[in-house]
Image (cartoon, grey):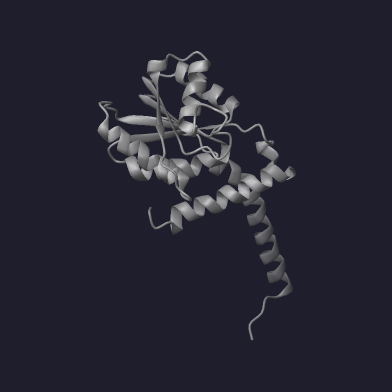
Amino acid sequence: MWTLTAQGWAIAIAFIAYFIFFIITHVHSFLAVTSPINSAEVLVVEGWLPDYAIEKALTEFQNGSYRQIITTGGTLRKGSYLTAYNNYADVSAATFIKLGLEAEKVVAVPTPFVVKDRSYASAVEFHRWLSNSNLQIESINLFSLDVHARRSWFLFKKILTPDIKVGVIAATTEDYNPSKWWGSSEGVRTIIHEAIAYIYGRFLNWQN
């Protein structure tokens, strides 16, 4: 029977501890990826983003060389009876206009209701809308939030490339300290959820 020596166990434990430490300190920066295309013509904004992220997206649009903002997003899960909107794409488009963006520069592309794979459905619907529009573009930047960015970027690239280049920008969350996400329950829940969702979308989802 083969077994580790005391020295072997010490090395194994040290390796495992280092591996866990590496994961903890690098997982957020991996998931909250920012890799924009400087010449992108369109800024695609995920409509479910909080208001502070929408404001950051508007700043990005104003500082870039974009021609259009496209908002995506599915059915509102709460409050649709109390507002004039029933999907996140329309809500975020209206928010941009309220913040001062010219109405002709923003287009809402709502996603049909789906039970799961909502990010995938948004990417598919955007691609369908783009194929039927007169907008001829070669590149976009996808504007997302924090650790959700990696998964959405993968899905949009999967559907749009090689015809369209896809960059990504992750707005910094205000829900927890990204550099010490393990210090709050919100950070831990968000990281675990998005890590599992990315692995599912990247390796297990048959649609990909």
Compared to residue 111, the image places residue 199 above or below, namely below
At x 32% / y 34%, what residue is drawn?
A: 129
Residue 171: quarter of image: top right
Instruction: Give the residue at x 67% y 51%.
Output: 21
- What x and y, as percent, mark residue 87? 48, 34
Depth check: give the residue in front, 125 or 82: 82
Q: Is residue 188 above or below residue 49?
A: below
Q: Residue at 65% of width from left, 37% of height from top?
A: 178
Q: Is residue 143 visible?
A: no
How far across and down, in percent of the image, does residue 38 sit?
40, 25
- Please state if 70 lies on the left or on the right of 57 as rendered: left
Which quadrant, please, contains the N terminus? bottom right
Residue that protrudes farthest toward the bottom in the picture:
1
Q: Nearer the viewer, residue 171 or 107?
A: 107
In the rendering, at what x and y percent does residue 60 appear?
Answer: 49, 21
Where 188 sits versus 141, above or below?
below
Tally the marks.
0
Viewer-closest of 25 and 195: 195
List the single residue furthest toward the front: 81
Question: Looking at the image, can residue 30 be seen?
Answer: yes
Residue 149 drawn at (x, y percent): 51, 39
Q: Residue at x 39, y 40 (%)?
A: 123
Q: Quadrant of residue 7?
A: bottom right
Q: Nearer the viewer, residue 130 or 8?
A: 130
